[in-house]
Amino acid sequence: MALKLLSKLRHQNLQITRYRNHHRLLAATRLFSDRPVSNLSTTDDSKFIIKNKPQTTTSSLKQHELAKFAAISDTWWDSEGPFKPLHVMNPTRIAFIRSTLCRHFSKDPNCARPFEGLKIVDVGCGGGILSEPLARMGAAVTGVDAVEKNINVARLHADLDPETSTIEYCCTTAGPSIDSESGGGEYTILVIEHVAAPAEFCKSLAALAYPGGATVLSTINRSMKAYATAIVAAEYLLHWELPSACNLRIAVAGGGGGVKLPKGTHQWSSFLTPEELVLILQRASINVKEMAGFVYSPLTGRWSLSDDISVNFIAFGTKDGQ
Ligand SMILES: C[S@@+](CC[C@H](N)C(=O)[O-])C[C@H]1O[C@@H](n2cnc3c(N)ncnc32)[C@H](O)[C@@H]1O
């Protein structure tokens, strides 16, 4: 299945990079032209205007799921708590983001602050687990989340360190509530970590992106393997608990901090196959150019990037029109 998709995507001129390890990641072949750094601006005229209330009518908002995130919002930064899988997975997804964005924007991936000059919007930022390292890498980060409690936690935590206190956090969604003063979110990169109502959600994201701008999206495959690990193992055998958007990470990581997962938490129908994600993004004028899977090794307790996209996967795309 994965092989069939790989050849299909390759046929479409997409790059599926084999990420066996970081060295290989950084040395991955570049198939697509990069956007010159000089095209980016660090001036304030591209600053986002964020309205403070989430658009509750947006179908990408799943109220019951948001309630779960709100209920455990004070545990975002407990590295042994319910969000342990995200903490453990963070270095791996950052490796993908660093590698793809540095290639795209002609940045040096080996320097301490490779994202200097880039503006990143982290949509569905939660407590800021991803926003903070992006800020430390030099990006001007705006984190948005539909749950106010998450934003409060993220703000408090970011303020503990001068390097992350620069992050702007706003309670809103990926819809029209994020506007730009300078023509539709120019200079912005969008990084998200879940897809709820994918088609509409991706359309909103694409509306924020500018031609040639980068989008990184991570989600869960609607595969039998994902079904087995997330639903059967996590819910029925191990009884782990976590909001469904995080489910696979818990299941594969083999430990979620001792919390329980009620049966029926996972929404099989909201998982996405890589083909579907590529098509949805294509319809939203975003071309997927690289894709990688996340795999967990029970031996090392670590995640790594892989060409196995059968469970968790991450995609990098650019908007048409550059
Ligand atoms: C799995 S968590 C990921 C958190 C963060 N990106 C990370 O990886 O650490 C998903 C987050 O998305 C938020 N969320 C879900 N749907 C959203 C939407 N339509 N707009 C904004 N935030 C949303 C939830 O409140 C939750 O905090």
Image: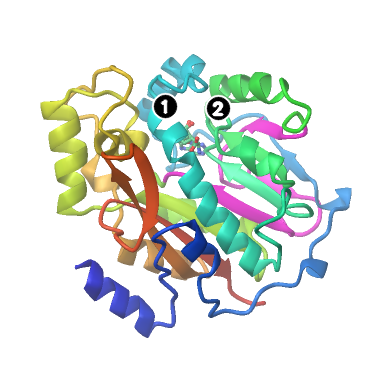
Q: Is residue 256 above or below residue 228?
A: above
For residue 32, which numbered disc appears in the image?
none
Mark 2 lies within 8 Å of ligand 1 (Cβ measured) = yes
Mark 2 lies on a secondary structure that is loop
Q: Is residue 178 magenta?
A: yes
Q: How many neighbours does mark 1 have within 10 angstroms: few (below 14), some (14-19), or many (20 or more)?
A: many
Taking the magenta stretch, the answer to whether it contains residue 300 is no
Q: Which callout, 1 or 2, points to the residue nearer the camera? A: 1
Residue 150: image location, x then y, percent: 55, 24
Q: Which residue is mark 2?
A: 127
> What residue lies at 27% left-to-right and 40% top-to-bottom?
299
Dot 1 or dot 2, earlier in sequence:
1
Are discs 1 and 2 less than 8 Å apart at CB?
yes
Q: Which amino acid lies under the numbered mark 2 shown in the image of this protein? A: Gly
Residue assigned mark 1: 83
Q: Which residues are magenta?
A: 166-194
Looking at the image, which is closer to me, 116 or 63? 116
